[in-house]
Amino acid sequence: MRIALEAIRAVAAQRGAGYVEACLAAGKVVMGEDGREMLELTAAAYEDLRARFSPPSIAGQAAGLARAVMGEAGAMLAGREPVSAEEKARRLAICEGCEFFTAQRRCTKCGCFMDVKAGWRAARCPVGKW
Ligand code: SF4
């Protein structure tokens, strides 16, 4: 399959760090019939990139948000202490160094905005980094 390089660059801010570089490494740049640069990918390479960099579906994000809100409500009702500023900063520092963290400060694994989620009591990193 072929994807225009400009389209890949246009969504880079919504993907994790190194998205454009990973795309370029996974395929071959060719000239399209319309004169645009295209990235030629095998179906397997495309699926690998999608799994690594695409956020969950809208339904998946909604389900994740619902779980996070319920978890926070449950933790609050159970009397758990709020997340300290230090702990929130520790979590965010891990996210900021993570390949799934985007320029929009979202996680492509859960779809959450990490400046909010990192401060929630019951929040967990979906890949176990915190
Ligand atoms: S929550 Fe986990 S996977 Fe998501 S950006 Fe933070 S460290 Fe990475």
Image (cartoon, helix red, strand yellow):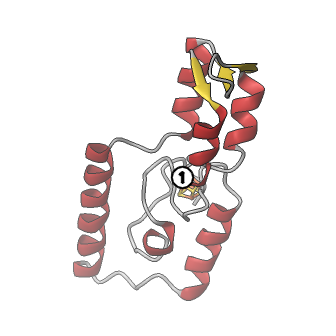
Q: Which of the 4 quarters of the picture holds residue 117?
A: bottom left
User: What residue is at 62 percent from the left and 22 percent from the top?
Assistant: 34
Report the label total.
1
Does residue 111 appear to the left or right of 96 in the view shown?
Answer: left
Residue denoted by label 1: 14
User: What residue is at 50 percent from the left and 40 percent from the top?
Assistant: 54
Q: In this picture, is 104 found above or below 107? A: below
Give the SS element for disc 1: helix
**Quadrant housing the N terminus:** top right
Q: Inspect the image, locate mark 1, and give the three-letter code of the amino acid beneath it.
A: Gln
Disc 1 under 8 Å from ligand 1? The reply is no
The local crowd at label 1, few if under 14, some if 14 to 19, many if 20 or more residues have their Cα within 10 Å, is: many
- On the image, the x and y values in percent for residue 52 come to 58, 35
Relative depth, front residue between 119 and 5? 5
**Quadrant housing the C terminus:** bottom right
User: What residue is at 24 percent from the left and 71 percent from the top?
Assistant: 74
User: What residue is at 46 percent from the left and 77 percent from the top?
Assistant: 119
- On the image, the x and y values in percent for residue 41 come to 64, 17
Q: Which of the 4 quarters of the picture holds residue 30?
A: top right
Does residue 66 appear to the left or right of 18 in the view shown?
Answer: left
- On the image, the x and y values in percent for residue 65 come to 30, 59
Q: In this picture, is 23 found above or below 73? A: above
Q: Quadrant of ligand 1?
A: bottom right
- On the image, the x and y values in percent for residue 16 come to 62, 49
Q: In this picture, is 59 found above or below 62? A: above
Does residue 18 appear to the left or right of 2 in the view shown?
Answer: right
